[in-house]
Amino acid sequence: MLKDLFIGLSQNELLNTAAKKYGLKLGAQSVVAGTNLEQAIQSIKELNAHGIACTVDNLGEFVFKKEEATEAKEQILEVIEAIHQNQVDAHISLKPSQLGLDIEYAFCLENVREIVDRASRYDFFVNMDMEDTKRLQPSFDILEELSKEYDNVGTVIQAYFFRAEEDIKKYKNYRLRIVKGAYKEPAELAYQEKSEIDSNYINLIEWHLLNGKFTSIATHDHKVINHVKEFVRANNIPKEKFEFQMLYGFRKDLQLKLASEGYNFCTYVPFGQDWYGYFMRRLAERPQNLNLVAKQVFNKKTNTMLGVAAGAYLLGRLTKKK
């Protein structure tokens, strides 16, 4: 129920617009690395100083017009140039929907191609984030199309999908980020029970560590992290073949600890005004994330806004039922 609530909130355009206006006042800077590129680069430099690499997401939601997608593309190209000019250790994460996937496949493909091409000039990696079911296969199609021309693009495998095992084997020669999944998917397509998702998540990680190109293990769960440490040790898997990933602002001490232990570590660095939908999906993905940032983010004013948001969402659901 809590997961459904957060997913519903993430899809509320009105609340997303309100969050743009009040985000920083509510403490969003604890989980978002700034609202502009200059702030994001400074955050990346600070992480790099601790031996932590970054993957950068120029946040964007509710893209329904070609001009909005084109603007998003130009902003991501600016990020690439800024990474190059500042010589920071970072690469790009992007969502196909932000670049026009919901508008026209061919249009989106060309936008992503331009980004991947620009990144390839500087030998930067581009990760295509995966979204919900309706965007899943088109995103894989874009990946396959671009990999005919470029070798600097990879994607994400979501462990809650039944098809994830098939997908990870099909794309084993790609750099893959493995996650549990952050959307609400139907029971005929995805595991619904946490225990099943967790089990599949571990299985996918182990398989790709043994057979894949490079594995990004995206988790805040120290139990999973400890399991991976033991698994790579037992199977003589070199540290060069994988990295741990966490979100900006979450479990900072553990991020620093893993980096200091010599593991490749990458922080997912989101920035921009459109932080709200991103943050709600992180809470939906793992409600425990709420505890990880509660002391940093949530105060009386924040709780009031979330209460109003939750009330608005539930009221909307009830109204639809009538």
Image (spheres, grey):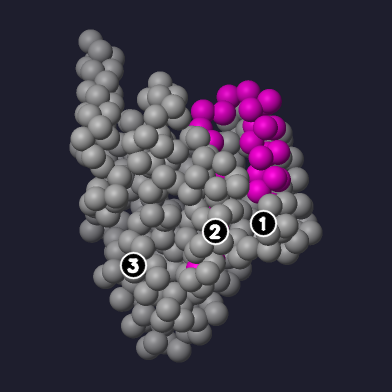
The quadrant of the picture occupied by the C terminus is top left
In the structure shown, which secondary structural element does the residue marked by tag 3 occupy? helix
| Front residue of this view, candidates 112 and 35 | 35
**Cα gap from disc 1 to disc 2, whole angstroms:** 9 Å
Which of the marked residues, 3 or 1, is nearer the chain's N terminus? 1
Return the x and y of residue 284 as percentages of the image width and height. 31, 43
Identity of the amino acid at label 2? Ile
* Contact? badges 1 and 2 (CB < 8 Å): yes
Q: Counting residues from the N terminus, which is met first, the one under dot 1 or under dot 2?
A: 2
User: Could you tell me residue 224's position as x and y percent?
Assistant: 31, 69
Q: Residues within 10 Å of mark 2 (few under 14, many from 20)?
A: many
Looking at the image, residue 199 lies above or below residue 260: above
Who's the residue at 51% across and 28% down the image? 62
The residue that disc 2 covers is 44
| Closer-to-camera residue (23/151) | 23
* Residue with the mark numbered 1: 83
Position of 306 with respect to 51 (left or right) is left
Q: Name the element at disc 2.
A: helix
Q: Is residue 123 visible?
A: yes
Q: Spot the residue most to the top.
A: 322
Tag 1: amino acid:
Ile
**Residue 44: horizontal and vertical position, in percent?**
54, 58
The disc at residue 253 is 3
Give the vertical position of 230 relative to 292 (above or below): below
Number of residues whose C-alpha sits closer than 10 Å to that of mark 3, classed few (under 14), some (14–19) or many (20 or more): few
Q: CA distance from mark 2 to mark 3?
A: 17 Å
Q: Does the magenta-highlighted stretch encompass residue 230?
A: no
Q: Which residues are magenta?
A: 52-80
* Closer to us: 73 or 308: 308
